[in-house]
Image (cartoon, helix red, strand yellow):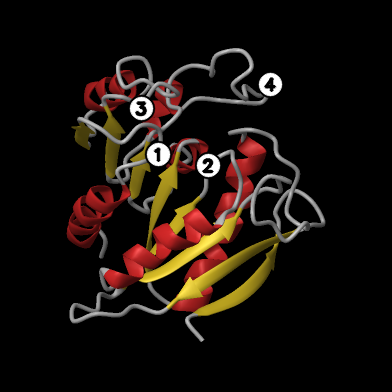
Amino acid sequence: MPWQWYRTPAATSERNLTFAVREPRGGNIRSQTVLVLHASSGFSMADMKLADNYAAQGFTAVVGEWFYTPHGFSTHNAPTFTGQSWAAVNDVSALVRATRRVTGQAVAIVGVSRGASVAALRAAQGHEEPVALLSCLCTSPLRQGWGAHSHDDFPTRHASGIAAPVSVWSAADDAVTPVNTQQRPFVNALRASGNVPRFRVYPHGGHGGAHEVFVADSSRWIAQVTP
């Protein structure tokens, strides 16, 4: 079977975190695991496809449901959505620990949109796993009506606490998390604190898109920075 499914208890409730593991394939098998964190649209087949693309790059690939939403491909037993909050960060940490137990490998985290934000907030707690952030909601709330949450916090506020390797990936035509108001201030804050991230802006891709080139580029970066 290409995917193996697991559950681990959430850190903040009596609910469970469900995650799927895909073995690596291809001619360049690597010794690292890539954990994909979905966006606020919820756990979906698109996230499994993204993880599968990392398996095709030779990584053990994991995709996990870190909160429940009725709009996604859900197990209906995940924690309630609390935005990119510190409670969500604790649940993601539980997911990282479970991933490491199952795969026995060093883990790099790939986050999309709010999944990227939570990965960066977790890094600000002192965790050392590399984080590749695509379309990160890094700096300020979404526009009203676009899914802002009262518990949202933002990685730019905590950039000085991030020592882990960071890469930030954006698209110039992203209208949801525009690069000049979201990712670029975060990158500048990291640089000011002495952390030099990999930063790339694609000309096209919209919000959370450009997956084919993003997977290829971020795979090379992950292989370089992950033990």
The amino acid beneath tag 1 is Gly
Q: Eyeballing the image, is 56 above or below 94? A: below
User: As drawn, is 188 to the left or to the right of 21?
Assistant: left
Q: In whole angstroms, how far apart are the C-alphas of marks 2 and 4? A: 17 Å
User: As drawn, is 127 to the left or to the right of 95?
Assistant: left
| Residue 175, image x, y percentages | 40, 21
Residue tagged 3: 160
Q: In whole angstroms, how far apart are the C-alphas of marks 1 and 2? A: 8 Å
Residue tagged 1: 208
Q: On the image, which quarter does residue 205 sit in?
A: top left
Q: In whole angstroms, how far apart are the C-alphas of marks 4 and 3? A: 23 Å
Asked which secondary structure carries label 1, the reply is loop
Asked which secondary structure carries label 4, the reply is loop
Circles 3 and 2, Cβ within 8 Å, touching? The answer is no
Q: In whole angstroms, how far apart are the C-alphas of marks 4 and 1? A: 23 Å
Q: State the residue in front, 19 or 43.
A: 43
User: As drawn, is 195 to the left or to the right of 92?
Assistant: left
Q: Which residue corresponds to the image point at 57% horizontal and 51% vertical from the top-left? A: 92
Q: Which residue corresponds to the image point at 53% horizontal and 42% vertical from the top-left? A: 39
